[in-house]
Every structure is written in structure tokens, then in C-alpha cells.
Amino acid sequence: MAFKISNEVKIGIVVIITVGLLIWGFNFLKGRNLFEKRNTYYIVYDRIDDMDESSPVLVNGLKIGLVTDIYFHPDTSGRIIAKILVDNTYHIPDSSTAEIYSVDLMGNKAIRLNLTKLKKYYKSGDTLISKIEKDLKSQVSAQMLPLKIRAEELMLSIDSVMSVVQNIFNENTRENLSKTFASIKVTIQNLEHTSISLDTLMQNEKWVLARIFANIESITNNLRNNNEQITQILDNFSMISDSLQKSNIKNTIQNANTALLQANKILGKINRGEGSLGMLINNDTLYYNLENASRNVDMLMHDLRENPKRYVHFSIFDFGKTVIVDENGNKVNKRNNIDKNGSGDTTSYNIIYKIQIRSARKQIPENSKEFKGITGVEENVIDGRYKYTVGEFATFDEALKYQQKITAKFSDAFVVAYSGNQQVPVQEARKDK
């Protein structure tokens, strides 16, 4: 018994075949071949710039696949995932990029695979590195941007130049330019008059110029006639220069410079008060010591004349009573000193010994470094000079011991004697004791 197929089954089979053909034809028209094996890759873009499904995937212009699906990333970040199918016979190297670019001027988009030379390849289902080509507007803008910037700078420069020109060619400047051109016109006229005057002068003074040229010619003839003598003079100068060169003037000048430098160093040390000579010139203590010594010698001579028995004793002679002489050569009482004003008042003749460490024409401040940290410095003004002393001693020996202690700081310190506020010679003070 033959199996009979019903009409409904036949219709169903035809419908199924038709639907399958429609699906296959639709995918074929979109570039999908359901009967070919292809690898699937995914690409994540921030934007797709009007790229559609079924857009081709190219390598060096050769189509090797197509975009099958485009949808948003499930992480709600707004990124877009593009799914592509590539022929399984073609392998994509690792680190290759999938770049969206414009295929034509109409703006149709495609994906271009920029392949690397790595030997490692992507596997089906991997995500490729995305890249988007700049659109025509962006490229034109990028290329035109430097030109735009330079054009703006040029316009600013032109504007600045025009401002300067406007400032220069204002009403006052135009007036000054008019006056300048007028002055130039007058100057040219003056030059014309001057040239005419010069031409007239040349015409009138031809004979003077002729005489000048004749004199010049005579001078040149004399030089030519005395050429031998001039040559001899030059030879003599050459011999003198050779002699000077052989005389070793350079070494002499160098020795003189060395001597001057050494002299300058010595003078500098003297000016700074260094060395014995410097101290002698810059410190007036020696001068006043010599002055005191001279005054003491003078007083000694007066005392020797008035009291010879102090120095020479002869039992058969009597030279009279002892007389005391002050620093001015006046006779004074041994116990009392007559007032210099002549009033007849007398003061006690008590002697105090001190150590003088400085003497100056101008007052030295109390905290000056010249005192080298010594305290208790006393200032006395004698004969218009400021004298600074330290210590008060009843005997000369005590003062001398203290002087030896401070010699390290003040090598020129010396012992002085005072009666009240008046300085008296040390020799006289020691005799009266």
C-alpha cells in the first residue's frame, strides 16, 4: 500500500523551504553566508559615526568580513559594542586595531583592520582594540587650525601697525612733515647757491690752486732728491730699535713693577699700622712719650740748676734750700702747689699713678674695640687731647707691675702720674715721694 502525503503536509513543507530560502537570501544579501564558517570578534567603541550593520570589514581594501550586530554595552556606560564576522581562514594578529573610517565622500562607514606583525593571534570571541578615524570636518579643522592661528596673529599685527601709523600720522605729525619737506626744499636751494658760490670761487682762485699744486710738486721733488738721507734716518731708527730690543727693557720694566708692588705692599702695611714702622707712624704714643721725655729732661735741668746738692754733694759747700720746679719751670712749695690762676689757693700734692693705654685727637667711644675689653677706662682731656688711663696706684712699683700685665694687649702702655686732675712728670712725682 503506497504512502500518500496529504496536501496539508505538502503545503507545510513548501512553506518551510520558502521561509528558509527567504532567511538565507536575506542574510546573503547582507553579506552573510550561513553555510560558511566564520570567526566572531567584538569591538567596543565610544561612538560608531553612522556605521550600520552589514558594514564591511576590510584589510588593505580587501573585504574579509562584515558587521553583524551593533548594540549598547550592558554596563550602561553608553559605549557601543560591534559584532563582526571574519572568514575563519584569515587570522588577526594580536594588538591589531579595528578602525572605523569613511569609505567614500558620501560618508559610508566601514571597519579597517590595522594589522601588526606579531605571531600571536586573536581567538574567536575576543575583543579587538577600537579606533575611530577623524571625520572630514575634524581633519580639515585640524589642518586649517595653524593657518587660522597665523591669520589671527597677522590680523593683530596689522591692527597694531595701523594703530602705530595712525598715532604717527596724526595732525601734528602731518604738520611736522609739511615743515620738514619745506625745510628740505630750503636746504636744496641753499645747496644750489653753495654750489654756485663754490664754482665761482674755483674760477676766481685758479691761480691759488695752481700755486698749491706747484708747492706740493716741489715737496715731492725734495722728498725724491733727499731719498738717500731719509733712508739713512730710517736705518738709524732701526738700529736704535734693535739696540733697545737687545737692552732687555722688558725685564727691567718687570723688575721695576715688582719693586713697585713690593713698595705698595710695604706702604699698605704702614698705613694699616702693621709692623714697627707702621706703629711709629700711625700711633702718636711714641711722639707724646718723646714730648714727655723732653719736658722731663728740661725739668731735670731746671731742678739740677736749682738743687745741685741733690745730685752732687760737697761738705764744704752749701747751695741753699731745696726748690721744687713744676712742669712749666716755675718754683713751687714742696708741700703745696700754687694755683695756676695766681689766686694763692693751695691744693694737696697727692700723687696717683695710672697706666695710659691710648691717646687721640678725637674722643673714643666707651665701648670701642680699641680698649680690647678692658673695663674701668678713665678719660682725661689734657692740652686738647683725649688721654685714656686704667687703674689707680699709690706707688710707682704697683703701677709698673700692672703695666707689665697688660703689655700683651697694649704694648705701648706706660705709667703716668696725676695730682688731682693735673698730669705731673713721673720723675718729679717719684722724687717728691
Image (cartoon, rainbow, N blue to C red):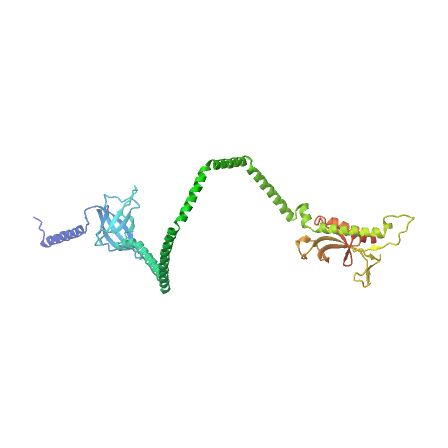
Of 147 and 432, which appears nearest the observer? 432
Horizontal placement of 423 versus 196: left or right? Answer: right
Q: Is residue 45 visible?
A: no
Could you tell me how many numbered marks the image carries?
A: 0
Horizontal placement of 269 versus 171: left or right? Answer: right
Please provide percent x and percent y for residue 103.
22, 51
Horizontal placement of 145 versus 279: left or right? Answer: left
Residue at the spot x=85%, y=52% of the render?
Answer: 307
Of 127 and 361, which appears nearest the observer? 361
Q: Hey, which residue is sitting farthest bottom in the picture? A: 171
Please provide percent x and percent y for residue 351.
80, 56
Horizontal placement of 264 versus 29: left or right? Answer: right
Name the quadrant containing residue 225.
top left
Please provide percent x and percent y for residue 62.
21, 46
Of 377 and 383, which appears nearest the observer? 383
Of 346 and 396, which appears nearest the observer? 346
Residue at the spot x=40%, y=48% of the render?
Answer: 207
